[in-house]
Amino acid sequence: MRRIVRRASLVMLICSLLASPTILRAEEVLRIDEDLIFIGPDDGAANEFLRANASLTCPRVTPDTCPALVFVEGQLGKEHLRLAYLHTGTVQKEEITSAKCITATQLDKALFLVETSEGPETARCFAVDFERGIAKILGKTSRFHCFRTVPDRGKAMLIHSHSGNGEMRLFELDLKTVDMTLQHVLTKTSLGARFGGIGLHMRISPDFGRAAYVARGSGMMHDTVHTLEVMDLTTTVSRCFAEGVRVRLGSFSSIGSGIPPLEWISNEESVYQHMPSEPNGPSELHQGTYILNRVNLTTHIVTMVLQDQLPLTIKGGSLWVNPLNGELIYNDTWILDPVEGALTSKNHPYSIGNAIEQCVSPSHLHIAYMLRPKATHAAVTIYMRLNGRDESLEVDRGPYWPTRPIGWIE
C-alpha cells in the first residue's frame, strides 16, 4: 500500500528511519512532486511514524451529541469549519479548523473530506472522522475531489488532478482505516483528445471499474449537442453509448454551453438528461422540455424515465447519488425515482419558505437552512430544525459567503 506524507515530514521520516534497523530502499520512494510524497510499502518504523504524525485531534460525535451539523462560518479570507449540536437545551459549537479557504464533502455517516488553504503552498487535505475524533492528513494539496463514495463497500474514489502535468490520479480511500491506494493514472498522452472530456464531469461506476463522461459537443450559444462515452478504467478502452444529447441553458446564464448531467444507478445502468429541440424554437425563456433516460451499458437498451417541463438552469443540470441513503438527486432540488420517474422534493417533509440554502439529514428527520432578511443584505443566519421540536434553533450568523451548511451526522 502506498502512503502519503507531507513534504515537511520527509526529513523527520528519513531521520527516524536512519535511527532504526528498517531500510527504505530507493525503489520504494515512488514519486516526489510539489503536491504529494508517496512512500512505498513498509511494515516497520516508516508506517508507524506515518500513523503517529499524520493525524490530528478533532471533536468526537457521540450518541449524546447526535444529530450534529457540520457547517462553515466566517468571512472571505477567514473561514471556520464547525460542528453544532443540541446539548441541555442549547446549541453547542466546536471548531474543527480554520483557514483562508475551506471545502468539505461528506463521504460516510461521520467521515468528511476537508481541504484547507491559506495559499498555493499551504494547502492541506484531511479525512475528518467524527466517530473516532481524528483528522488524518491525506496530502499537501487542494486538488482532491471525491468522484464517488460507496459506504456499503467501505470505499471512496478520489481524484487528484494536476493539469500542469497533464494527468489525473485516481485513489481508492478505505473509509474505515482512511488509507489511500493509487488505482489509476490517466494522462493526456495516453488518452489523447478524450482527456479534455473526463475531468470533474465524469462519473465513476459503483464498483469503480468504469467511467461515463461527456466526450464532445457542438452547437451555438446556450444550445449544444453532445456525445456520451463509457471507458474501462483498467484498459482505457472507450465506446459511445449516447449521441445527439442536447442541453439548453437559460437566457440568464453567463456560461456559453452546458454539460448534460449523467450518473450511474448500478454497475450496469446509467441515467442521463436530454433536452429535445423545440419544434417552434424555444417559446419560454425560463422553461424547457427535459427527458431523463436510463441506459443499460451492456444490452444498450434505453428506457425513458421522465419527460417534463422544468425550469432551465445556469449550467445544464446535475445528477448525483447521495451516498448516505442512495437517493438520486436531480438539479439539487428533487429526488428522482429512476424506475417510476417520479420527482420528490429533496427536502421533504420540510418546506422552508424563503430559504436560500437547505440541507436535510439523510433520514429526512432534521434540516438546516439559511435565511437572510433582504435579498440585498450581506448577512445570513443558519438555523436547524430537529425532529420532535416545533421551533428552529439558531446555529450561527455570517456573510452570505462563505457561511453554509455542509452535512449531518446522525
Image (cartoon, helix red, strand yellow):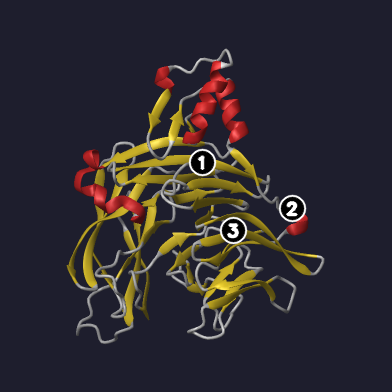
- Image vertical order of residue 374 relative to residue 406, above or below: below
The answer to whether residue 275 is left or right of residue 352 is left
Q: Mark 1 or mark 2: name the one nearer the start of the chain.
A: 2
The answer to whether residue 345 is left or right of residue 279 is right
Q: Mark 2 or mark 3: name the one nearer the start of the chain.
A: 2
Query: What amino acid type is highlighted by mark number 1?
Result: Leu
Question: Dot 1: few (<14), some (14–19), or many (≥20) neighbours within 10 Å?
Answer: many
Cα distance, mark 2 to mark 3? 19 Å
Residue drawn where x is 56% and y is 81% of the image: 372
Helix, strand or loop at mark 1: strand
Cα distance, mark 1 to mark 2? 24 Å
Residue drawn where x is 21% and y is 66% of the image: 225
- Image vertical order of residue 322 relative to residue 282, above or below: above
Q: Which residue is mark 1?
A: 138
Mark 1 vs mark 3: in front = 3
Q: Which residue is mark 3?
A: 81
Name the residue furthest left: 219
Residue drawn where x is 51% and y is 82% of the image: 377
In front of the other: 220 or 91: 91
Mark 2 vs mark 3: in front = 3
Residue 266 placement (x, y as % from top left):
44, 52
Residue drawn where x is 25% and y is 47% of the image: 195
Query: What amino acid type is highlighted by mark number 3?
Result: Leu
Cα distance, mark 1 to mark 3? 18 Å
Query: What amino acid type is highlighted by mark number 2?
Result: Thr
Helix, strand or loop at mark 3: strand
Question: Dot 3: few (<14), some (14–19), or many (≥20) neighbours within 10 Å?
Answer: many
Q: Name the mark on residue 62.
A: 2
The answer to whether residue 12 is left or right of residue 26 is right
In front of the other: 116 or 147: 116
